[in-house]
Image (cartoon, rainbow, N blue to C red):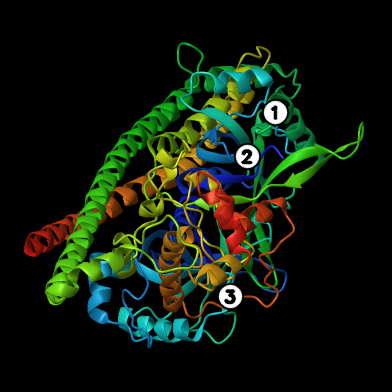
């Protein structure tokens, strides 16, 4: 087997969760960055949020050029991809399995992660978030691909790495870029009357407002809370350090 | 009642839970509002309903269990005050994360909840329960969450929504105008509509909202920079604290050894030293029972210390201190060979299921002695955690650790793969 297990650092896991929970109407996707060790364990240290070239609900591929562009110029390499399944089962669809198989042709050790969210059991009011890791194999020569399960563990990482933080704050930028592109496409249409132009401009404004209130706002709040929390923790650690220094000098 | 939590707060909860090797708990901060909803129906002109809306803004994680209550479930007001400080007035609930448990409040949680309700003065205090469960081969994991209102008689469970971008669809852009040949229409909308556009033909609103967005994004980047700095600072302090703890432990053991030596009468000193430097085992040839092991038996070392210096894997640098955490379902024998001789012992609930641990505990082979000493340390740590989370309810259908995946077979041969030199003698011994 090309891959024995996947270790997902918890700060990378945090960014994946942020991304997956950002929208329940579409599947989002990104790339996993890390390395593979000699025991065929894939270590994922961070993730990159991607723009989707195809916004259709059931399609989550990216173009090979995009993949290559992301791969070069990074300190680590791309070891896998992740995407979300809002309101849908966590298992990969046929398209997902085929996409994964295609990536595996470039890199045997490429892994796929899926996050399933916004699931709720109406009876028990239980919410659920699931995540799974898989690769693809060809059952028999010439037949369809099927998935194989790869063990995945979220590995503790007490602090949030710089790359993960940067990835997390990319999301609002990416959303805004996508919106700008969509607007530019229709804005260039010359035959629209002023009312329609005003309408489209308002749609852009409305969408950007949604992004700010749903994503940028809560993101900023989380960041501010984190700064406060860290101040607290650092103060506690300082006290503990002083106490330990005293204890050490007492022992000597 | 409707309840909501932001995706970022939820993810943060998951993150802190993932980082803890035992149960995890904390407080939920936010606000509760009454919202009026108007509705008109055939039977009445209008009816107003009052909907209680609960918004979770933030969470305050507790750094360890039993930080504000004791084993009997008695809440300590002083500790509570110290933990919450001025955030106390924003507390609307508390949460708990457990692995492989049922989605019910445990007895201790119920009595703590009653006390918190009274102490904090929040009559409708809520409790958010997270339960983590995995498949036998650990390829799929589920995090289930339920929000309880335990102080109510009925409708104790509340739906928790996570507001998100949802429906901002780009399909709402119009690609063509409604066909209209009216001359008046065209004239009016051209004249009056011109207000909306600036001299470049760009809508003024768009420029304005873009400015707002840019300003917001700049702030996000700025605060992100602050977070990054504080995370690095936190890291540094944590490292220093860990180093000091190690030094203290070392110093203590040195002193203990000195004290013991001073107590042994002179003529027996040499024998004592010789005895201590060799383990008395049949078939032992090589390994010396180092004095260091006595030290580790008093203070369990952090994970990073368990890894020997001759470990080869590159991933050491980035993940030495962090092992995949024991999870009660199906991961018992999983050992990360990449971390050299790093140990991963037993189930999350502290019970030792690895046969190699049991049989080699007798120290039959000397080389195993040191290894198993370190394994015992990890067992101790796990068991402590288990005591802390004694309401750990393992599911009846907990899959056995001897799953048929290739992966766990690798783990069965763990002792061999753990040693960088891959000493086969170890694996044989473990199967005895």
The answer, for residue B267, to whether it is visible in the render is yes
* Residue bearing mark 1: A54
Q: Nearer the viewer, residue A98 or B183?
A: A98
Q: Position of residue A98 (x, y in %)?
A: 79, 34
* Residue bearing mark 2: A82
Choose top left, top right, bottom left or bottom right for residue B299. bottom left
Q: Residue at x 15, y 74 (%)?
A: B267
Local crowd size for mark 3, using a 10 Å CA cut-off: few (<14), some (14–19), many (≥20): many
Q: Is residue A226 left or right of residue A173?
A: left
Q: Nearer the viewer, mark 2 or mark 1?
A: 2
Q: Nearer the viewer, residue A147 or B85?
A: A147
| Chain under callout 1 | A
* Residue bearing mark 3: B157
Local crowd size for mark 2, using a 10 Å CA cut-off: few (<14), some (14–19), many (≥20): many
Real-space Cα distance between discs 1 and 3? 39 Å
Determine contact: label 3, label 2, CB under 8 Å. no
């Amino acid at each position: 087997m090309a891959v024995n297990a996947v270790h997902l650092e918890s700060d990378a896991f945090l960014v994946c969760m942020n991304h997956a929970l950002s929208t329940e109407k579409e599947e989002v996707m990104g790339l996993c960055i890390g390395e593979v060790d000699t025991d065929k364990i894939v270590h994922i240290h961070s993730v990159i949020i991607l723009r989707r070239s195809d916004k259709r609900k059931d399609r989550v591929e990216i173009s090979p050029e995009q993949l290559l562009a992301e791969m070069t110029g990074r300190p680590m390499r791309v070891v896998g991809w992740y995407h979300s399944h809002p309101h849908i089962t966590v298992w990969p669809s046929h398209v997902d399995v085929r996409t994964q198989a295609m990536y595996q042709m470039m890199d045997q050790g490429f892994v796929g992660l899926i996050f399933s969210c916004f699931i709720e059991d109406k009876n028990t009011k239980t919410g659920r978030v699931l995540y799974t890791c898989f690769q693809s194999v060809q059952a028999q020569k010439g037949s369809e691909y099927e998935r194989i399960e790869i063990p995945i563990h979220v590995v503790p990482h007490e602090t949030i790495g710089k790359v993960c933080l940067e990835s997390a704050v990319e999301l609002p930028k990416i959303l805004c870029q996508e919106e700008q592109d969509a607007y530019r496409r229709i804005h260039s249409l010359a035959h629209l009357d002023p009312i329609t132009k005003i309408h489209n401009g308002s749609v852009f404004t409305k969408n950007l407002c949604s992004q700010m209130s749903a994503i940028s706002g809560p993101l900023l709040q989380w960041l501010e809370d984190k700064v406060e929390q860290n101040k607290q923790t650092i103060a506690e650690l300082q006290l503990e350090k002083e106490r330990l220094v005293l204890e050490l000098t007492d022992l000597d | 009642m409707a309840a909501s939590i932001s995706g970022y707060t939820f993810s943060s909860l998951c993150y802190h839970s993932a980082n803890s090797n035992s149960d995890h708990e904390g407080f939920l901060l936010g606000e509760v509002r009454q919202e009026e909803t108007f509705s008109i129906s055939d039977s009445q002109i209008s009816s107003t309903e009052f909907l209680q809306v609960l918004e979770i803004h933030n969470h305050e994680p507790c750094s360890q269990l039993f930080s504000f209550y004791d084993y009997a479930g008695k809440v300590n007001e002083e500790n509570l005050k110290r933990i919450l400080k001025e955030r106390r007035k924003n507390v609307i609930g508390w949460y708990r994360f457990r692995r492989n448990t049922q989605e019910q409040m445990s007895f201790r949680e119920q009595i703590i909840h009653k006390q918190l309700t009274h102490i904090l003065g929040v009559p409708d205090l809520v409790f958010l329960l997270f339960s983590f469960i995995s498949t036998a081969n650990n390829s799929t994991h589920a995090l289930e969450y339920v929000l309880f209102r335990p102080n109510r008689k009925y409708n104790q469970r509340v739906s928790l929504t996570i507001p998100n971008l949802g429906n901002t669809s780009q399909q709402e852009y119009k690609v063509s105008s409604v066909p209209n040949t009216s001359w008046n229409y065209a004239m009016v909308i051209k004249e009056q509509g011109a207000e909306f556009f600036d001299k470049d033909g760009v809508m003024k609103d768009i420029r304005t909202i873009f400015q707002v967005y840019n300003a917001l994004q700049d702030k996000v980047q700025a605060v992100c920079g602050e977070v990054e700095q504080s995370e690095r600072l936190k890291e540094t302090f944590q490292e220093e604290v860990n180093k000091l703890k190690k030094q203290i432990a070392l110093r203590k053991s040195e002193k203990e050894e000195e004290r013991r030596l001073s107590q042994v009468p002179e003529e027996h000193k040499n024998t004592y030293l010789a005895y201590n430097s060799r383990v008395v085992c049949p078939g032992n040839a090589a390994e010396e029972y180092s004095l260091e092991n006595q030290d580790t038996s008093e203070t369990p070392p952090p994970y990073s210390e368990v890894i020997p210096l001759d470990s080869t894997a590159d991933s050491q640098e980035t993940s030495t201190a962090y092992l995949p955490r024991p999870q009660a379902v199906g991961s018992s024998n999983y050992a990360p060979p990449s971390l050299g001789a790093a140990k991963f012992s037993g189930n999350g609930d502290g019970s030792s299921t690895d046969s190699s641990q049991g049989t080699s505990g007798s120290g039959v082979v000397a080389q195993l002695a040191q290894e198993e000493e370190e394994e015992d340390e990890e067992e101790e740590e796990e068991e402590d955690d288990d005591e802390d989370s004694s309401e750990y309810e393992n599911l009846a259908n907990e899959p056995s650790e001897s799953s048929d995946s290739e992966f766990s077979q690798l783990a069965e041969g763990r002792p061999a793969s753990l040693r960088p030199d891959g000493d086969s003698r170890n694996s044989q011994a473990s199967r005895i």
